[in-house]
Amino acid sequence: MDNPALVDVTRGNLTESLHRGSVAVVDTGGNLVFGIGDVDAKVYPRSAIKALQALPLVESGAAEALDLTDAELSLACASHNGEEIHANAARVMLLKAGLNEDDLECGPQWPQRMEDAAKLILADEVPCGLHNNCSGKHAGFLGLAKTMGVDTRGYIEPDHPVQREVRLAMEQMTGDTLTEDVCGTDGCSIPTYASPLRSFARAFASFGTGEGLEPLRADAARQIYDACINEPYMVAGADRFCTRVMETFRGRVFVKTGAEGVFCAAIPELGFGVSLKCDDGATRAAEVMMATVLEIALELNEDEAVLMDNLVNPPVLTRRGVQAGHIRPGEEFLSALKAALKQAK
């Protein structure tokens, strides 16, 4: 059975396109507070779970040994724009481990914004691994390998000690066994393991609150959470959803996007974890889905309400900047979400 249409795209008075998907909201007890679509289907979380992948870096003591700042720890959880500030921070992380950009195995990537790509072109340079949106995560993996005393080469392989530690942390946080049959290769070359949305939401409920976690892991989760909300620009960058939301909500929420329409979030004050997937992989729809959950779940102040109004109903514009329609949550999604969260409160 197809997942329901959760987001409408209008032009004029008509709906021009629909985006189907699924959303799971889970509490710290593992109870499904809200579910729409198939929340038990296995999906690749991609970069949405980088904060969980960073847990071994912190709880092993590697982050402390390397003297990583909040900005650098935030970058370890980032899918950044490849701006100069991001590339430089990744370079410093590597230097602290006695390494350099040649040790990165994530591959080069042009910066996301035209102005940052233009800087490289004008300097007669080409992008390197530092500009890869995952360079902070990879710098963290390399730092962990260095402090573990294992070979840094091949740290992206599933059987490397670093990736084994990451997989174990993911299994413990989600409650799932991650085997080869659910293992794919992410865009930055590390393993990515599929699990149900319900499991990822459960993991982020614990991540945001520390409930159900051993003291060492709860402390590591808190350090990572605090680093990301203290330095939200490092998580993404200019004009990015994750940065804008965490800057505005000032610690109330943690949000992280992933490729192919995946999002995860933690809402500690409610004890909720959220995960979602837009079936066609569209970021525009996944952002509306996540913004809708946040808007309905939380009591908003004025600044938060203004931001959410823009993110829940972003305009469809012509090339001249004239509004031609909206991207908006579907009525079925809205009504079901409101009813479930009202009951949960």
Image (cartoon, rainbow, N blue to C red):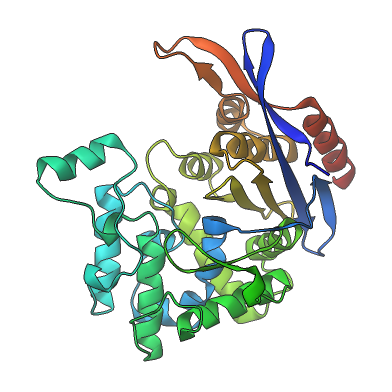
Against 291, residue 253 (above or below) is below
Q: Is residue 35 left or right of residue 208?
A: right
Residue 245 visible in the displayed image? yes
Against 43, residue 298 (above or below) is above
Image position, residue 221 (x, y; %): 57, 68
Outermost residue toward the right? 343
Residue at x 40%, y 47% (from the top left corner): 233
Residue at x 39%, y 10% (from the top left corner): 320
Q: Is residue 252 left or right of residue 108?
A: right
Against 246, residue 66 (above or below) is below
Front residue of 345 and 308: 308
Front residue of 95 and 178: 178
Rendered image quadrant of residue 292 = top right
Rendered image quadrant of residue 312 = top right
Residue at x 38%, y 54% (from the top left corner): 133
Image position, residue 30 (x, y; %): 81, 63
Against 6, residue 147 (above or below) is below
Image position, residue 263 (x, y; %): 60, 49
Residue at x 54%, y 11% (from the top left corner): 324
- Number of marks present in the image shown: 0
Position of the N terminus by quadrant: top right
